[in-house]
């Protein structure tokens, strides 16, 4: 009996659930301008999946990486949802990310 498919499905379910959590909290505490950093983390995880020692580890890294790439694109959308009143907005000043001027020129991605 091979349980790797069920294990990957449960891992995907957990990573997607964690993705919702970190996008909401990340936008609340940091703001959407931090989007390049989870994007880079996701791309690094996806690149790491190419060099993983076996298919299971490769799949885990690829799933986690894809979730972070998706989350990076959702940070701007989460900011819009907070502005609409669907989620709470942080009343405090959010910290500016490193290279904020460059990030503002690039613009946030969306899917």
Image (cartoon, rainbow, N blue to C red):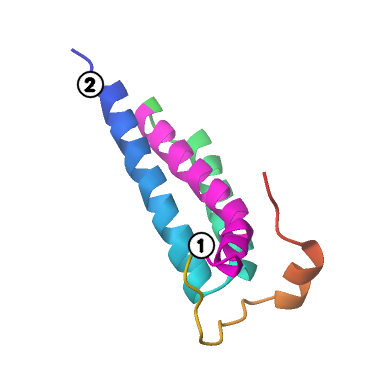
The percent position of residue 4, horizontal first and vertical second, equals: 28, 23
Q: Nearer the viewer, residue 92 or 87?
A: 87
The residue at the far front in this view is: 85
Name the image quarter holding the C terminus: top right
Residue for point 23% across, 21% down: 3
Q: Residue 47 has which mark?
A: none
Q: Nearer the viewer, residue 52 or 19?
A: 19
The percent position of residue 30, horizontal first and vertical second, equals: 53, 74
The correct choice, above or below, for 72 with respect to 45 in the image is below
Q: Nearer the viewer, residue 32 or 98?
A: 32
The residue at the far top in this view is: 1
Residue carrying label 2: 3
The percent position of residue 79, horizontal first and vertical second, equals: 59, 65
Do the numbered discs 2 and 1 sit on residues whose CB atoms are within 8 Å?
A: no
Mark 2 vs mark 1: in front: 1
Residue for point 37% across, 36% down: 12
Residue carrying label 1: 86
Kindly tell me whether residue 51 is visible in this rendering: no
Residue for point 56% across, 87% down: 93
Binning the other alpha carbons within 10 Å of mark 2 as few (below 14), some (14 to 19) or many (20 upward) gives few
Q: Quadrant of residue 16?
A: top left
Q: Secondary structure at mark 1?
A: loop
Judge from the rendering whether residue 71 lies leftward or rightward of residue 5; answer left or right. right
- Asked if residue 93 lies in the magenta stretch, the reply is no
Residue for point 57% across, 72% down: 31
Kindly tell me whether residue 91 is visible in this rendering: yes
The percent position of residue 1, horizontal first and vertical second, equals: 18, 12
- Asked if residue 70 lies in the magenta stretch, the reply is yes
Q: Main secondary structure of the magenta part?
A: helix
Range of residues picked out in magenta: 56-85
Q: CA distance from mark 2 to mark 1?
A: 39 Å
Task: Identify the mark nearer the N-term, 2 or 1.
Answer: 2
């Amino acid at each position: 009996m091979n349980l790797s498919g069920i294990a990957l499905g449960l891992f995907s379910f957990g990573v997607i659930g964690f993705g919702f959590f970190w996008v909401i909290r990340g936008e609340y505490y940091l703001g959407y301008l931090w989007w390049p950093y989870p994007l880079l983390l996701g791309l690094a995880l996806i690149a790491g999946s190419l060099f993983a020692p076996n298919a299971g580890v490769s799949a885990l890294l690829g799933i986690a990486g894809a979730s972070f790439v998706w989350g990076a694109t959702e940070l701007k959308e989460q900011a819009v949802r907070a502005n609409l009143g669907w989620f709470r907005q942080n009343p405090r000043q959010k910290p500016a990310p490193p290279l904020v001027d460059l990030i503002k020129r690039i613009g946030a991605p969306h899917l």
